[in-house]
Image: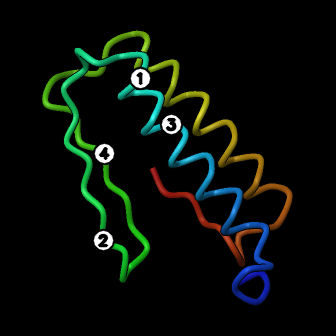
Amino acid sequence: MFDDPGKDVVCAAVSILTINTVNSFESFLPDERTDVRVDKEKGLIECVFENEPSEKAGLLLDSYFLGISGIEKEYGREYLKLEE
């Protein structure tokens, strides 16, 4: 809710990082067993690992968290609140 739909840079940034991370799992780590669940109405994407994530998957997740954390710091917790 940073701005109107189509102008919301926070939503766009989070969406791009999330989709890119999921696509990276599928493209670069095809043997990494993940189940991706999407709820378009709620705007949720869930990526569940069947096994403990590999070191490479962990690196992708760390990179995702770094990007998301940067967005939270830049725009504030009013628009993005991370929970671990």
Task: Look at the numbered disc 1 and give the secondary structure of its residue.
Answer: helix
- Say which residue appears at 79% left-offset and 85% top-offset: 3
Q: Is residue 75 left or right of residue 29?
A: right
- Please state which of the two labelled residues, at mark 1 or mark 2, is closer to the viewer: 1
Q: Are marks 3 and 4 in contact (CB under 8 Å)?
A: yes
For the residues labelled 3 and 4, the Cα–Cα distance comes to 10 Å
Q: Are marks 4 and 1 in contact (CB under 8 Å)?
A: no
Badge number at residue 47:
4
**Three-letter residue code for mark 2:** Asp
* Mark toward the start of the polypeptide (3 vs 4): 3
Badge number at residue 39:
2
Vertical placement of residue 72 versus 50, above or below: below
For the residues labelled 2 and 3, the Cα–Cα distance comes to 17 Å
* Mark toward the start of the polypeptide (4 vs 1): 1
For the residues labelled 1 and 3, the Cα–Cα distance comes to 10 Å
For the residues labelled 1 and 2, the Cα–Cα distance comes to 22 Å
**Three-letter residue code for mark 1:** Ser
Q: Are marks 2 and 4 in contact (CB under 8 Å)?
A: no
**Dividing the image into 4 quarters, which one contains the N terminus?**
bottom right
Q: Which residue is mark 3?
A: 21
**Three-letter residue code for mark 4:** Cys
Tell me how many marks there are: 4
Badge number at residue 27:
1
Counting from the top left corner in percent of width and height, residue 46 is at 32, 54
Q: Is residue 67 left or right of residue 73?
A: left
- Say which residue appears at 36% left-offset and 83% top-offset: 41
